[in-house]
Amino acid sequence: MSSLPSHVHLIDHPLVQHKLTLMRRKDASTSSFRGLLNELSMLMAYEVTRDMPTQEIHIETPLEPMRAKVIDGKKLVFVSILRAGAGILDGMLSVVPGARVGHIGLYRDPQTLKPVEYYFKMPGEMRERDVILIDPMLATGNSAVAAVTRVKALVPKSIKFVCLLTCPEGIAAMQSAHPEVPIYTAAIDRQLNAHGYIVPGLGDAGDRIFGTQ
Ligand code: URA
């Protein structure tokens, strides 16, 4: 992509790029792939929560009382798109342990090729919450678009989308359906291949996380 749309945030920190390169290698083992994704998820959580509101609370240091900032993690919901989103969830929760968690299960209908929902579970009071949708691969964009549409119907305060890898086709699909949703990604690869895989990519993220190849 020549110039990046303003709602796309490329997380190009050297640590993120280094770990992503190790994950892409076809000889990375399941356990190293999973471990690297976990570390990367913590680093991506750092970027995506950069503008989270803080509030001041009263504390006492060993020397004196003071007012100090904390984030309200309970207002945040990580929504994992099954099944590969699970690979990002633990890393994100380890840095924002107070966050709530929602899940959306979608599969692709072999006839229509449209995403079909088989699971949907969200915390209550969604109107008061900021949502971070997670899925390692934003490829055709079909599931991401469907997931955002479904979450939007609950009218949360905000929605962001975080992935590890995307491509121009995935960004275009999200831009056309949900132009106001910011996308955070560690890389934008060349294109989708005829089978809907991102190339050069890293293969099937779910298979690599769970060792189901
Ligand atoms: N899903 C994956 O797991 N990998 C891709 O390259 C595209 C979609």
Image (spheres, rainbow, N blue to C red):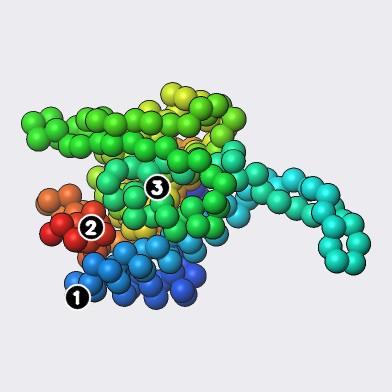
Residue that appears at 22% across and 61% down: 208
- The label number, if any, that marks residue 157 in the structure image: none
Crowding near the residue tagged with mark 3, few <14, some 14–19, many ≥20 C-alpha atoms within 10 Å: many
Q: Is residue 5 visible?
A: no
Q: Position of residue 114 (x, y in %)?
A: 19, 32
Tell me the element at label 3.
Answer: strand
Q: Position of residue 99 (x, y in %)?
A: 54, 45
Mark 3 or 1, nearer chain start:
1
Tell me the element at label 2.
Answer: helix
Mark 2 or 3, nearer chain start:
3
Query: Alpha carbon of mark 2 to alpha carbon of mark 3: how far?
Result: 17 Å
Looking at the rendered structure, the kind of residue marked 1 is Asp
- Which is more foreground, mark 1 or mark 2? 2
The yes-or-no answer for disc 1 within 8 Å of ligand 1 is: no
Crowding near the residue tagged with mark 1, few <14, some 14–19, many ≥20 C-alpha atoms within 10 Å: few
Mark 1 or 2, nearer chain start:
1
Q: Which residue is mark 1?
A: 27
Query: Alpha carbon of mark 3 to alpha carbon of mark 1: how far?
Result: 25 Å
Answer with the quarter of the image where residue 185 lies: bottom left
Q: Which residue is mark 3?
A: 134
- Which is more foreground, mark 2 or mark 3? 2
22 lies above or below 154:
below
Crowding near the residue tagged with mark 2, few <14, some 14–19, many ≥20 C-alpha atoms within 10 Å: some
Q: Which residue is mark 2?
A: 210
Answer with the quarter of the image where residue 129 lies: top right
Query: Alpha carbon of mark 1 to alpha carbon of mark 2: how far?
Result: 15 Å
Q: Do the residues under discs 3 and 1 have CB atoms within 8 angstroms?
A: no
Looking at the rendered structure, the kind of residue marked 3 is Ile
Q: Position of residue 128 (x, y in %)?
A: 59, 30
172 sits to left or right of 181: left
The front one of 61 and 212 is: 61
